[in-house]
Amino acid sequence: NAGVMQNPRHLVRRRGQEARLRCSPVKGHSHVYWYRQLPEEGLKFMVYLQKENIIDESGMPKERFSAEFPKEGPSILRIQQVVRGDSAAYFCASSIIPRGGARDTQYFGPGTRLTVL
Amino acid sequence: AQTVTQSQPEMSVQEAETVTLSCTYDTSESDYYLFWYKQPPSRQMILVIRQEAYKQQNATENRFSVNFQKAAKSFSLKISDSQLGDAAMYFCAYRSAIWPGTYKYIFGTGTRLKVLA
């Protein structure tokens, strides 16, 4: 783990509430990825962001989910009006793309486990 | 679209013995990375080993090595001298190296490794 921080580590919400998950990438990393892991499954890509830009959101559900990575501060994954099916572990990863190439490794945070009652 | 398949939901190995975890993938790209990640009960994603597709030499990290067969699209992980601390879920992952791109990881469904004392 190269220092990606996520908070909270555990989040409990009732159906219909909003969930906000935060991710602070490794210092100097300007690329953030969010993944979702449903129980007993692998991680599934949700969204890829650079500072102030969403690059690829092809894995995001069309409704209720949004993500941002502002110029200052952490990346936020927001889930509005949560339902039981949103219960999962949400992982953030960050990377830095070396100059002139596409060679990088994503460093993962410890994840946020969301439980919807 | 790329896919990653792990056909072994669960494997067991005796302590100090060797075990091989299987992974196959499908892609039409020529340049990519392959990874093995370990996920212990803490759920932290830990990078075990990484392989660059353009390198013919199999990657090795201490007790962990891979057998990368590019033509067969196979990427197995061998763990030698298994230790109790190796018990975890292991995920195989693919990432394109084509520039430009989103570089999202595509994960398999995982193999749960049990180490028997």
Image (cartoon, helix red, strand yellow):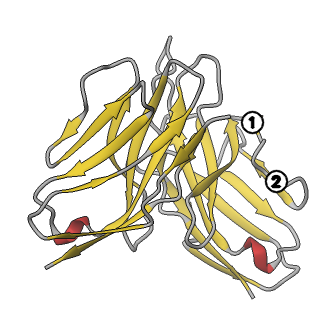
Q: Is residue A54 visible?
A: no
Asked if residue B69 is positioned above or below residue A61 in the image, the reply reads above
Q: Disc 1 to disc 2, how far (Cα)?
A: 12 Å
Q: Tell me the amino acid under the disc marked 1.
A: Asp
Q: Tell me the amino acid under the disc marked 2.
A: Ser
The mark found on residue A80 in the picture is none
**Left or right of A52 on screen, residue B73:** left
Asked if residue A115 is positioned above or below residue A36 in the image, the reply reads below
Label 1 environment density (alpha carbons within 10 Å; few <14, some 14–19, many ≥20): some
- Of mark 1 and mark 2, the one earlier in the sequence is 1
Chain to which mark 2 belongs: A
Give the residue drawn at x 38%, y 17%.
Answer: B54
The mark found on residue A56 in the picture is 1
Q: Residue furthest top?
A: A100
Return the residue nearer the eye: B91 or A10: B91
Q: Which residue is mark 2?
A: A66
Q: Which x, y percent locates residue B9?
A: 45, 66
Q: Residue furthest front?
A: B72
Asked if residue A42 is positioned above or below residue B103 in the image, the reply reads below
Q: Which x, y percent locates residue B55?
A: 32, 19
Q: Tag 1's secondary structure?
A: strand
Q: Is residue A113 visible?
A: yes
Q: Which x, y percent locates residue B13?
A: 21, 68
